[in-house]
Amino acid sequence: GTAIATYYADLAEYYEHSMTELLPAGTLVKFGGEKEITKTSGKDNNVFGVISSQPGLVLNHLVSENHLPVALCGRVPCRITGKINKFDKLTLSRVPGVAKKKTWLDTILFRPTIGVALESKQDKTEKLIEIFIHAHL
């Protein structure tokens, strides 16, 4: 058999973004904006992926300053606000490009589940934590 091994654990693809919008690693993105991707907002019901810091497997490698790797699935650092317990489901927060713990109210309002927290965070400030992302359109 044939195997592929990588140290990092996300599947990413490069997408064009507007150079006027700051998209640091861990930012939740969606299709739209001036180019191909833009930050999510709290009013969105979709998320396309997370800006990857070090993709494990890349589908199209476009070396350009206006293209960023977007993690489509797998283990990736993500910007999170609020308290999170390991294995909590995540959804979009009111802060553009940032996730939060999914509550029962989010479920009632049909907010999407974007992934699962793989570590806990006990303060309310924004921080990068490791998540498993499985974004859907």
Image: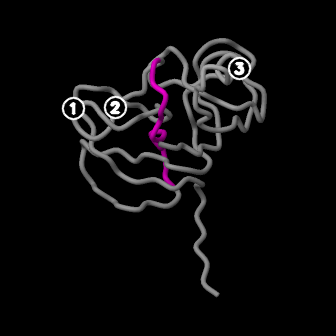
Distance from disc 3 to disc 1, alpha carbons, whole Å, reads 32 Å
Earlier sequence position, callout 3 versus callout 2? 2
Tell me the kind of residue under disc 2.
Thr
In the displayed structure, 41 sits above or below 67; it is above
In the displayed structure, 2 sits above or below 124; it is below
Q: Which residue is mark 3?
A: 103
Asked if the residue at tag 1 contacts the one at tag 2, i.e. Cβ–Cβ closer than 8 Å, the answer is yes
In the displayed structure, 43 sits above or below 53; it is above
Q: Which residues are magenta?
A: 43-55
Residue 45 magenta-highlighted: yes
Task: Identify the residue at horizontal 75%, vertical 28% (top origin).
Answer: 120
Residue lying furthest top: 124
Percent of width and height locating residue 125: 61, 13
Earlier sequence position, callout 3 versus callout 1? 1
Task: Identify the residue at horizontal 58%, vertical 55% (top origin).
Answer: 8
Q: Which residue is mark 1?
A: 34
